[in-house]
Image: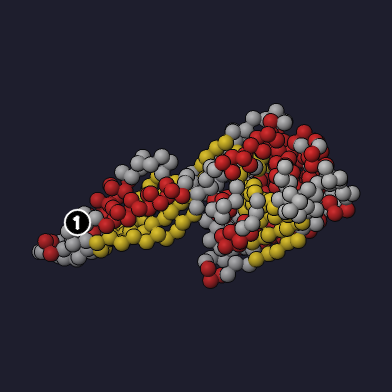
Amino acid sequence: MSAPASQKPARSATAHEGPAYSAPALLPLAEQNTRQYLRDLAELVAIDSGSYSPHGVNRIADWLTTRLHGLGFTVERTRPDPEQGPPVGDVLVARRTGRLTAAAGGRRILLAGHMDTVFEDGTAAERPFSMVGAIAHGPGVSDDKGGLLAGLTAVEILLRAGWEDYAELVLIATPDEEIGSPASRPVTERVAAGADYALALECARENGDLVTGRKGVADFQLVVTGRAAHAGIEPERGANAALAAAHHVVALQELNGRWPGVTVNVGVLRAGTRPNIVCPEAELRIEVRAGTTAGLHLAADAVRALAAREVVPGTTTTVVQVDLCPPMEDTPAARAVFAVARGAAADLGVAVGAAATGGVGDANLIAGTGVPTLDGLGPVGGADHTPQEWLDTSTVPTRVAILAATVAKLGRHS
């Protein structure tokens, strides 16, 4: 590892205006770091760090802490309250102060990745890190160990080049992104507050595109209350909650296509206990996804309006919103960040597009605080959450250089 950047000579106040931190200038440093990147990636993939394996996640956090200290970062580890859900690992927040104040044009940049995977303990031994040509395989190789490591490497080469033209660099690594970030969400939202830009370190799409939009998610529970009766002797005295739930399912699914980019899915339906009882209660669990907050609100209002209808006489339906993850909206401010990254890529002869996805991540939570956010800044990878998960290591130097150049450009207001 190179010496901490604090030991490097400071550059002039106008250094940011020259080519020193452009993607072409940073590419040779990224290429020199590729061998170390692969060694580090193999080490991280060899550690089981499933969301429900706090010990494994904290081994990743320990590894990151050591590296970040060596780069001059201060590191804070927050252990989530076990009463708030299943035990998970620590939330890691690292900070490094640059030489520019906000008044002097310095900007606060947040890099965000996650340490957990979807895989159970023992997967790393069953399916160890491997390379087939330039393609790396292993649990978490793309999601998100490859991306998290790309962020660390980009920072390292920038600091090695003497870059200090920013107000503050903040890196957050979460332990529970794969289960919806229930424990880390308050920390993420607190850390994001006041950031000027956020760059999320999930890997690029398979075609190399960056992510400018992620749908938000609202989960609802509908409880239908009817009236029990003997199904053979006096069914007319009952009010069938299962029948009412069936009407709701049809009406809810018909909401699909009503608004652009909004989807509604009835994923769970439970009703009744015995076939000889008119069903007195039913439960539906539904998920709404939308690319905008307005879309989520429209769908939520429609869900409540449908539930208010008495589709079967004698039944009533109550609605509870059980979870809400804001969308990462494709806003003009986010597009401006994308333009910086696209420009850095173009400097290397790489064309990158802007993609939207229905999947959610920590980028949603950050964008929900109002911070312009861009995702997909890791190397190119795919088949996440499957045994076929892969990372194209031939893209590592280029993507690290693009990320580093993007950070450098955003670090100072121009």
- The answer to whether residue 393 is seen in the rendering is no
Q: Secondary structure at mark 1?
A: loop
Mark 1 neighbour class, 10 Å CA radius: few under 14, some 14 to 19, many 20 or more: some
Residue 134's x, y, as percent? 69, 35
Residue 180's x, y, as percent? 52, 56
Residue 218 placement, left or right of 98: left
- The answer to whether residue 414 is seen in the rendering is yes
Residue 268 placement, left or right of 216: left
Residue depicted at x 56% and y 60%: 185
Residue 69 placement, left or right of 240: right
Residue depicted at x 38% and y 41%: 259
Outermost residue toward the bottom?
A: 83
Q: Which residue is mark 1?
A: 312
| For residue 401, above or below residue 175 | above
Q: Quadrant of residue 35?
A: top right
Residue depicted at x 27% and y 57%: 308
Q: Nearer the viewer, residue 158 or 118?
A: 158
Q: Quadrant of the C terminus?
A: top right
Residue 4's x, y, as percent? 84, 53
Instruction: Give amino acid for label 1.
Output: Val
Outermost residue toward the top?
A: 349
